[in-house]
Image (cartoon, rainbow, N blue to C red):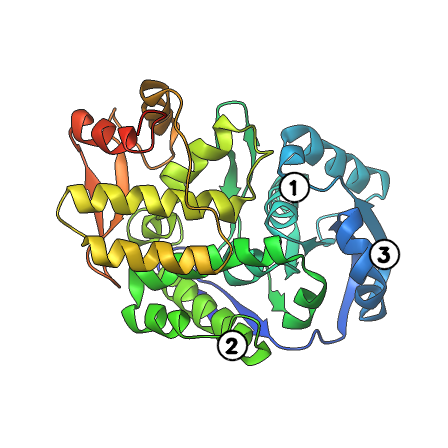
Amino acid sequence: MIVPIELAHTQNITYDITIDTLPTLTFDTSVVVVTNPTVAGHHLDRLLSKLSVTQLHVVTIPDGEGYKTLETVENILNECFEHKLDRKSLLIAFGGGVIGDMTGFTASLYQRGIDFIQIPTTLLSQVDASVGGKTGVNNKYGKNLIGAFYQPKAVYIDPTFLETLPEREFAAGVAEVVKMAVMFDKDFFHYLEGADLNNVETIKEMIAKSVSLKAWVVNQDEKEAGIRAVLNYGHTFGHVVENETDYTTYLHGEAVAIGMVMANALAIELGLFTQEEADAVKAFLVSANLPTEYVIKDIDDFYEHFFLDKKSAKGSIKFILPNGMGNYKMVSDTDEDIVKKVLATFGESA
Protein backbone atom coordinates (compact mmCIF):
# COMPACT_ATOMS: atom_id res chain seq x y z
CA MET A 1 0.00 0.00 0.00
CA ILE A 2 1.25 3.49 -0.87
CA VAL A 3 -0.01 6.65 0.81
CA PRO A 4 1.14 9.86 -0.89
CA ILE A 5 2.21 13.05 0.84
CA GLU A 6 1.50 16.01 -1.45
CA LEU A 7 2.42 19.36 0.08
CA ALA A 8 1.15 21.42 -2.83
CA HIS A 9 0.00 24.23 -0.57
CA THR A 10 3.51 25.03 0.62
CA GLN A 11 6.60 23.83 -1.22
CA ASN A 12 5.13 21.42 -3.78
CA ILE A 13 6.90 18.54 -2.05
CA THR A 14 5.70 15.02 -2.74
CA TYR A 15 6.84 11.65 -1.43
CA ASP A 16 5.40 8.22 -0.79
CA ILE A 17 4.74 6.29 2.39
CA THR A 18 5.06 2.62 1.50
CA ILE A 19 3.41 0.09 3.82
CA ASP A 20 4.78 -3.30 2.83
CA THR A 21 7.77 -5.60 3.18
CA LEU A 22 10.94 -3.53 3.01
CA PRO A 23 12.19 -3.55 -0.61
CA THR A 24 15.78 -3.43 -1.84
CA LEU A 25 16.90 0.21 -1.76
CA THR A 26 19.57 1.48 -4.16
CA PHE A 27 21.30 4.83 -3.73
CA ASP A 28 24.16 6.11 -5.87
CA THR A 29 25.69 8.05 -2.98
CA SER A 30 27.14 7.79 0.53
CA VAL A 31 24.61 6.71 3.13
CA VAL A 32 24.68 6.93 6.93
CA VAL A 33 22.23 4.77 8.86
CA VAL A 34 21.34 6.20 12.29
CA THR A 35 20.02 3.66 14.77
CA ASN A 36 20.32 2.51 18.39
CA PRO A 37 21.74 -0.68 19.93
CA THR A 38 18.32 -2.28 20.51
CA VAL A 39 17.11 -1.88 16.93
CA ALA A 40 20.55 -2.74 15.54
CA GLY A 41 20.65 -5.97 17.51
CA HIS A 42 17.32 -7.12 16.12
CA HIS A 43 17.19 -5.75 12.59
CA LEU A 44 20.37 -4.07 11.31
CA ASP A 45 21.62 -7.11 9.38
CA ARG A 46 18.31 -7.32 7.58
CA LEU A 47 18.39 -3.63 6.65
CA LEU A 48 21.98 -3.82 5.42
CA SER A 49 21.06 -6.77 3.20
CA LYS A 50 18.47 -4.53 1.54
CA LEU A 51 20.81 -1.60 0.83
CA SER A 52 22.90 -1.08 -2.28
CA VAL A 53 24.90 2.15 -1.92
CA THR A 54 28.22 3.74 -2.89
CA GLN A 55 29.48 3.96 0.70
CA LEU A 56 27.72 2.86 3.86
CA HIS A 57 28.29 3.89 7.47
CA VAL A 58 26.29 3.10 10.60
CA VAL A 59 25.99 5.51 13.51
CA THR A 60 24.65 3.98 16.72
CA ILE A 61 23.38 6.37 19.38
CA PRO A 62 22.11 5.56 22.88
CA ASP A 63 18.55 4.34 23.23
CA GLY A 64 15.91 6.48 24.94
CA GLU A 65 14.11 9.81 25.12
CA GLY A 66 16.72 11.10 27.56
CA TYR A 67 19.26 11.17 24.72
CA LYS A 68 17.06 13.23 22.40
CA THR A 69 19.29 16.27 22.81
CA LEU A 70 21.39 18.77 20.86
CA GLU A 71 24.49 16.94 22.11
CA THR A 72 23.39 13.74 20.40
CA VAL A 73 22.59 15.62 17.18
CA GLU A 74 26.07 17.15 17.29
CA ASN A 75 27.54 13.64 17.66
CA ILE A 76 25.65 12.50 14.55
CA LEU A 77 26.82 15.60 12.68
CA ASN A 78 30.41 14.88 13.66
CA GLU A 79 30.08 11.37 12.25
CA CYS A 80 28.79 12.86 9.00
CA PHE A 81 31.81 15.16 8.81
CA GLU A 82 34.19 12.30 9.67
CA HIS A 83 32.78 10.26 6.78
CA LYS A 84 32.96 13.28 4.45
CA LEU A 85 29.30 13.33 3.48
CA ASP A 86 28.37 15.89 0.82
CA ARG A 87 25.12 17.52 -0.20
CA LYS A 88 24.10 14.51 -2.27
CA SER A 89 24.55 12.09 0.63
CA LEU A 90 21.65 10.49 2.48
CA LEU A 91 20.73 9.73 6.09
CA ILE A 92 18.47 6.81 7.00
CA ALA A 93 16.52 6.95 10.26
CA PHE A 94 16.22 3.34 11.40
CA GLY A 95 14.35 3.11 14.68
CA GLY A 96 11.51 4.72 16.61
CA GLY A 97 10.33 8.29 16.95
CA VAL A 98 13.42 9.48 18.81
CA ILE A 99 15.73 8.22 16.06
CA GLY A 100 13.49 9.68 13.37
CA ASP A 101 13.23 13.09 14.99
CA MET A 102 16.97 13.42 15.54
CA THR A 103 18.00 12.02 12.16
CA GLY A 104 15.63 14.35 10.36
CA PHE A 105 16.84 17.32 12.37
CA THR A 106 20.47 16.40 11.63
CA ALA A 107 19.65 16.12 7.93
CA SER A 108 18.10 19.60 8.01
CA LEU A 109 21.31 21.03 9.51
CA TYR A 110 24.12 19.23 7.67
CA GLN A 111 25.46 21.55 4.96
CA ARG A 112 22.11 23.39 5.19
CA GLY A 113 20.13 20.30 4.35
CA ILE A 114 20.60 16.84 2.85
CA ASP A 115 18.11 14.08 2.08
CA PHE A 116 16.89 11.51 4.58
CA ILE A 117 14.42 8.65 4.60
CA GLN A 118 12.46 7.08 7.42
CA ILE A 119 12.37 3.34 8.13
CA PRO A 120 10.38 3.23 11.40
CA THR A 121 10.55 0.14 13.60
CA THR A 122 8.08 0.94 16.40
CA LEU A 123 4.30 1.14 16.16
CA LEU A 124 4.34 4.74 17.41
CA SER A 125 6.73 5.82 14.69
CA GLN A 126 4.95 3.77 12.01
CA VAL A 127 1.51 5.24 12.70
CA ASP A 128 2.58 8.79 13.51
CA ALA A 129 6.10 10.04 14.15
CA SER A 130 7.68 9.05 10.82
CA VAL A 131 5.01 10.83 8.78
CA GLY A 132 4.87 14.56 8.22
CA GLY A 133 8.36 15.98 8.65
CA LYS A 134 8.44 17.10 12.28
CA THR A 135 12.02 16.86 13.55
CA GLY A 136 13.76 18.06 16.68
CA VAL A 137 15.08 17.52 20.18
CA ASN A 138 14.10 18.17 23.78
CA ASN A 139 15.71 20.49 26.31
CA LYS A 140 15.16 21.37 29.97
CA TYR A 141 12.25 23.63 29.07
CA GLY A 142 10.21 20.99 27.30
CA LYS A 143 9.73 18.51 24.48
CA ASN A 144 10.59 19.19 20.85
CA LEU A 145 11.11 22.91 21.45
CA ILE A 146 14.18 22.91 19.18
CA GLY A 147 13.62 21.57 15.68
CA ALA A 148 12.43 22.08 12.13
CA PHE A 149 9.78 20.99 9.68
CA TYR A 150 11.88 18.92 7.29
CA GLN A 151 10.28 16.32 5.07
CA PRO A 152 11.87 12.94 4.29
CA LYS A 153 12.29 11.76 0.71
CA ALA A 154 10.38 8.56 1.49
CA VAL A 155 8.97 6.50 4.35
CA TYR A 156 9.09 2.69 4.34
CA ILE A 157 6.80 1.05 6.89
CA ASP A 158 7.35 -2.68 7.29
CA PRO A 159 4.98 -4.12 9.93
CA THR A 160 7.20 -7.19 10.40
CA PHE A 161 9.68 -5.02 12.33
CA LEU A 162 7.07 -4.95 15.10
CA GLU A 163 7.52 -8.67 15.80
CA THR A 164 10.37 -7.92 18.22
CA LEU A 165 8.73 -4.86 19.78
CA PRO A 166 8.17 -5.12 23.57
CA GLU A 167 4.52 -5.07 24.66
CA ARG A 168 4.92 -1.75 26.43
CA GLU A 169 6.34 -0.09 23.29
CA PHE A 170 3.50 -1.54 21.23
CA ALA A 171 0.91 -0.14 23.63
CA ALA A 172 2.56 3.29 23.42
CA GLY A 173 1.94 3.24 19.67
CA VAL A 174 -1.71 2.33 20.18
CA ALA A 175 -2.15 5.62 22.07
CA GLU A 176 -1.34 7.55 18.90
CA VAL A 177 -3.84 5.43 16.96
CA VAL A 178 -6.54 6.29 19.53
CA LYS A 179 -5.64 9.97 19.13
CA MET A 180 -6.40 9.81 15.39
CA ALA A 181 -9.67 7.97 15.92
CA VAL A 182 -11.07 10.23 18.64
CA MET A 183 -10.20 13.38 16.71
CA PHE A 184 -11.23 12.39 13.19
CA ASP A 185 -13.07 9.09 12.83
CA LYS A 186 -15.77 7.82 15.19
CA ASP A 187 -16.20 4.59 13.21
CA PHE A 188 -12.47 3.90 13.47
CA PHE A 189 -12.65 4.24 17.25
CA HIS A 190 -15.55 1.79 17.43
CA TYR A 191 -13.59 -0.59 15.17
CA LEU A 192 -10.68 -0.44 17.62
CA GLU A 193 -12.98 -1.18 20.56
CA GLY A 194 -13.91 -4.53 19.04
CA ALA A 195 -10.55 -5.37 17.45
CA ASP A 196 -7.96 -7.94 18.46
CA LEU A 197 -4.82 -5.83 18.74
CA ASN A 198 -2.66 -8.96 18.62
CA ASN A 199 -3.94 -9.90 15.17
CA VAL A 200 -1.50 -9.19 12.33
CA GLU A 201 -4.21 -8.03 9.92
CA THR A 202 -5.64 -5.71 12.58
CA ILE A 203 -2.21 -4.17 13.11
CA LYS A 204 -1.83 -3.58 9.38
CA GLU A 205 -5.29 -1.99 9.29
CA MET A 206 -4.39 0.27 12.23
CA ILE A 207 -1.21 1.40 10.53
CA ALA A 208 -2.85 2.01 7.16
CA LYS A 209 -5.80 3.93 8.58
CA SER A 210 -3.64 6.04 10.92
CA VAL A 211 -1.12 6.88 8.19
CA SER A 212 -3.92 7.81 5.78
CA LEU A 213 -5.46 10.14 8.37
CA LYS A 214 -2.08 11.68 9.20
CA ALA A 215 -1.31 12.18 5.50
CA TRP A 216 -4.71 13.82 4.97
CA VAL A 217 -3.95 16.29 7.75
CA VAL A 218 -0.34 17.02 6.75
CA ASN A 219 -1.29 17.54 3.10
CA GLN A 220 -3.57 20.37 4.25
CA ASP A 221 -1.30 21.91 6.86
CA GLU A 222 2.40 21.07 6.82
CA LYS A 223 3.57 23.53 9.46
CA GLU A 224 0.79 23.31 12.02
CA ALA A 225 -0.89 26.62 11.22
CA GLY A 226 -4.34 25.07 11.53
CA ILE A 227 -5.74 21.53 11.45
CA ARG A 228 -2.39 19.82 12.04
CA ALA A 229 -2.39 21.18 15.59
CA VAL A 230 -5.28 18.78 16.21
CA LEU A 231 -2.75 15.93 16.14
CA ASN A 232 -1.55 17.26 19.49
CA TYR A 233 -4.66 15.99 21.28
CA GLY A 234 -3.38 14.64 24.59
CA HIS A 235 0.07 16.09 24.00
CA THR A 236 -0.36 19.46 25.73
CA PHE A 237 -1.01 17.64 29.00
CA GLY A 238 1.23 14.67 28.16
CA HIS A 239 4.30 16.80 27.47
CA VAL A 240 4.04 18.31 30.95
CA VAL A 241 3.80 14.81 32.43
CA GLU A 242 6.94 13.81 30.51
CA ASN A 243 8.79 16.95 31.60
CA GLU A 244 7.82 16.55 35.26
CA THR A 245 9.11 12.98 35.25
CA ASP A 246 12.35 13.83 33.39
CA TYR A 247 11.37 11.67 30.41
CA THR A 248 12.30 8.58 32.41
CA THR A 249 9.02 7.29 33.85
CA TYR A 250 6.74 7.14 30.83
CA LEU A 251 7.15 6.32 27.18
CA HIS A 252 5.85 9.10 24.96
CA GLY A 253 2.69 7.21 24.04
CA GLU A 254 2.02 6.44 27.70
CA ALA A 255 2.20 10.14 28.55
CA VAL A 256 -0.13 10.89 25.64
CA ALA A 257 -2.62 8.36 27.01
CA ILE A 258 -2.62 10.17 30.37
CA GLY A 259 -2.85 13.46 28.51
CA MET A 260 -5.92 12.33 26.58
CA VAL A 261 -7.67 11.42 29.82
CA MET A 262 -6.86 14.90 31.17
CA ALA A 263 -7.98 16.59 27.95
CA ASN A 264 -11.22 14.63 28.02
CA ALA A 265 -11.86 15.80 31.58
CA LEU A 266 -11.48 19.42 30.44
CA ALA A 267 -13.74 18.73 27.45
CA ILE A 268 -16.42 17.40 29.81
CA GLU A 269 -16.11 20.51 31.98
CA LEU A 270 -16.60 22.69 28.87
CA GLY A 271 -19.59 20.69 27.65
CA LEU A 272 -17.82 19.29 24.58
CA PHE A 273 -17.59 15.62 25.55
CA THR A 274 -19.85 13.33 27.54
CA GLN A 275 -18.78 11.31 30.53
CA GLU A 276 -19.83 8.20 28.60
CA GLU A 277 -17.52 9.07 25.71
CA ALA A 278 -14.64 9.80 28.08
CA ASP A 279 -15.23 6.52 29.90
CA ALA A 280 -15.13 4.65 26.57
CA VAL A 281 -11.77 6.19 25.68
CA LYS A 282 -10.34 5.46 29.13
CA ALA A 283 -11.64 1.88 29.09
CA PHE A 284 -9.99 1.25 25.73
CA LEU A 285 -6.68 2.74 26.88
CA VAL A 286 -6.77 0.52 29.97
CA SER A 287 -7.56 -2.53 27.81
CA ALA A 288 -4.52 -1.66 25.69
CA ASN A 289 -2.31 -1.67 28.81
CA LEU A 290 -1.80 2.08 28.84
CA PRO A 291 -1.62 4.23 31.99
CA THR A 292 -4.54 6.58 32.61
CA GLU A 293 -3.75 7.84 36.14
CA TYR A 294 -1.31 10.55 37.19
CA VAL A 295 -0.98 12.51 40.43
CA ILE A 296 -0.24 16.23 39.96
CA LYS A 297 1.82 17.36 42.92
CA ASP A 298 1.80 21.11 42.20
CA ILE A 299 -1.21 22.29 40.19
CA ASP A 300 0.11 25.85 39.72
CA ASP A 301 3.45 24.60 38.40
CA PHE A 302 1.74 22.09 36.08
CA TYR A 303 -0.42 24.91 34.71
CA GLU A 304 2.57 27.20 34.10
CA HIS A 305 4.23 24.51 31.99
CA PHE A 306 1.42 24.87 29.44
CA PHE A 307 2.85 28.25 28.38
CA LEU A 308 5.95 26.50 27.01
CA ASP A 309 3.75 24.48 24.66
CA LYS A 310 4.43 25.32 21.00
CA LYS A 311 0.73 25.93 20.31
CA SER A 312 0.51 28.62 23.00
CA ALA A 313 0.86 32.20 21.81
CA LYS A 314 0.57 35.69 23.30
CA GLY A 315 0.01 34.30 26.76
CA SER A 316 -2.94 32.17 25.67
CA ILE A 317 -3.00 28.38 26.02
CA LYS A 318 -4.51 26.45 23.14
CA PHE A 319 -6.10 23.13 24.09
CA ILE A 320 -7.02 20.49 21.53
CA LEU A 321 -10.18 18.81 22.79
CA PRO A 322 -12.68 16.25 21.52
CA ASN A 323 -15.98 17.78 20.46
CA GLY A 324 -17.98 14.58 20.49
CA MET A 325 -16.39 11.32 19.31
CA GLY A 326 -14.67 11.78 15.94
CA ASN A 327 -14.68 15.57 16.07
CA TYR A 328 -12.42 18.19 17.59
CA LYS A 329 -12.32 21.76 18.81
CA MET A 330 -9.35 24.05 19.38
CA VAL A 331 -10.03 26.04 22.52
CA SER A 332 -8.14 29.17 23.55
CA ASP A 333 -8.58 31.58 26.46
CA THR A 334 -10.06 28.96 28.74
CA ASP A 335 -10.53 30.46 32.17
CA GLU A 336 -7.55 29.60 34.40
CA ASP A 337 -9.86 28.63 37.25
CA ILE A 338 -11.67 26.10 35.06
CA VAL A 339 -8.42 24.49 33.93
CA LYS A 340 -7.07 24.34 37.48
CA LYS A 341 -10.37 22.88 38.69
CA VAL A 342 -9.88 20.01 36.24
CA LEU A 343 -6.20 19.63 37.19
CA ALA A 344 -7.26 19.44 40.84
CA THR A 345 -9.17 16.24 40.08
CA PHE A 346 -5.75 14.71 39.35
CA GLY A 347 -4.15 16.25 42.44
CA GLU A 348 -2.88 14.46 45.52
CA SER A 349 -6.03 15.26 47.47
CA ALA A 350 -8.39 14.13 44.69
Q: Confirm whether residue 122 shows in the render.
A: yes
The residue under the point 37% across, 37% down is 237
Label 3 environment density (alpha carbons within 10 Å; few <14, some 14–19, many ≥20): some
Q: CA distance from mark 3 to mark 2?
A: 36 Å
Query: Which quadrant, please, contains the C terminus?
Result: top left
Q: Where is mark 2, residue-wise? A: 202
Q: Name the side, left or right, on which 345 lies relative to 117.
A: left
- Mark nearest the camera among 2 and 1 is 2
Q: Which comes sooner in the sequence, label 3 or label 2?
A: 3
Q: Where is mark 1, residue-wise? A: 106
Q: Position of residue 282 (x, y in %)?
A: 36, 54
Q: Are marks 1 and 3 in contact (CB under 8 Å)?
A: no
Q: CA distance from mark 1 to mark 3?
A: 17 Å
Amino acid on which disc 3 is placed: Leu
Q: Which comes sooner in the sequence, label 2 or label 1?
A: 1
Q: Secondary structure at mark 1?
A: helix
Residue 318: give its label: none
